Image: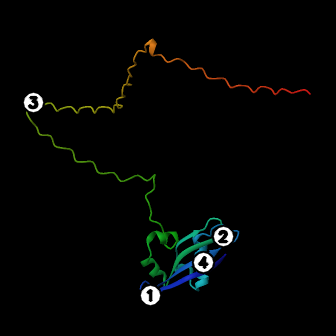
Amino acid sequence: MDVEVLRKKDNPLLKRVEVTFKAVHKGEATPPRDTLRAELAKALKATKDVVVVDGAASTFGRYETHGYAKVYKTKEQALAVERRHILVRNRLAEPEAKPAEGAPKPEKPAPPPKKEETKPAAEKKPEPKAEAKPEKVAPREKAPVKEEKKPVKPEEKKPEVKKAEPKKPEPKKKEGK
């Protein structure tokens, strides 16, 4: 695989060099980001850990990949400036740990029991029962609309037209001399 630097721009404010490159990979698949970083580090005389490939795309039907990369002065500068997902793609940072699916989720503590007031038996009212929630009812089906048919009078009937049968070509007669 050959890597060619097409454009190189120095960005002193962010302490990096921005590079547009073209990688030619004859008879091979599109190179992974890790391989592109290693080849760019060789071409730019830098270490692999300060090279960040921002994006790379292959062209259909060709063995070329065009891309954009950034070469920082130090790894710390790269970690401070670069977006998190780009660092994860370039394996310079670990992805955020997500809770495992099988791990139990912390439960909310149960609310403290309510204190019931002590009332004389005569004053106690029966608590209202919770109403049962209605079950989901299927939406109403619309009744089919009946079309009114007018009775057909015999004189209004249209005569049936017979289709004409195609004529068969008549055989040519041979004339005798």
- Give the spatial CA distance, label 2 vs label 4: 19 Å
Q: Which residue is mark 3?
A: 121
Instruction: Please state which of residues 163 and 51 is positioned toward the viewer in this rendering.
Output: 163
Earlier-in-chain disc, 2 versus 4:
4
Residue depicted at x 87% and y 27%: 175
Task: Measure how far apart labels 4 and 3 are at the Cα level.
Answer: 86 Å
Q: Position of residue 28 (x, y in %)?
A: 68, 68
Badge 1 or badge 2: first in the primary sequence = 1
Indicate the quadrant where residue 176 lies.
top right
Marked residue nearer the N-terminal end (1 or 4): 1
Mark 3 vs mark 1: give the one in front. 1
Disc 1 marks which amino acid? Pro
Q: Nearer the viewer, mark 1 or mark 2?
A: 2
Distance, label 1 to label 2, CA atoms, is 34 Å
Residue mark closest to the camera, 2 vs 4: 2
Q: Which residue is mark 4?
A: 38
Cα–Cα span, label 1 and label 4: 23 Å
> Disc 2 residue type?
Tyr
Quadrant including the N terminus: bottom right
Of the residues under marks 3 and 1, which one precedes in the sequence?
1
Asked which quadrant contains residue 127, the reply is top left
Residue tagged 1: 12
Q: For the residue carrying disc 1, how many other residues have a C-alpha within 10 Å: few (<14), some (14-19), or many (20+)? A: few
Give the label, 4 or 3, closer to the camera. 4
Density class for disc 2 (Cα within 10 Å; few <14, some 14-19, many ≥20) is some
How far from the left and from the top, in percent, is residue 80? 42, 78
Could you say which disc has been placed on residue 63 in the image? Answer: 2
Tell me which residue sits at (37%, 25%) in the image.
Answer: 145
Q: Amino acid at mark 4?
A: Ala
**Can you say which quadrant of the picture contains the C terminus?**
top right
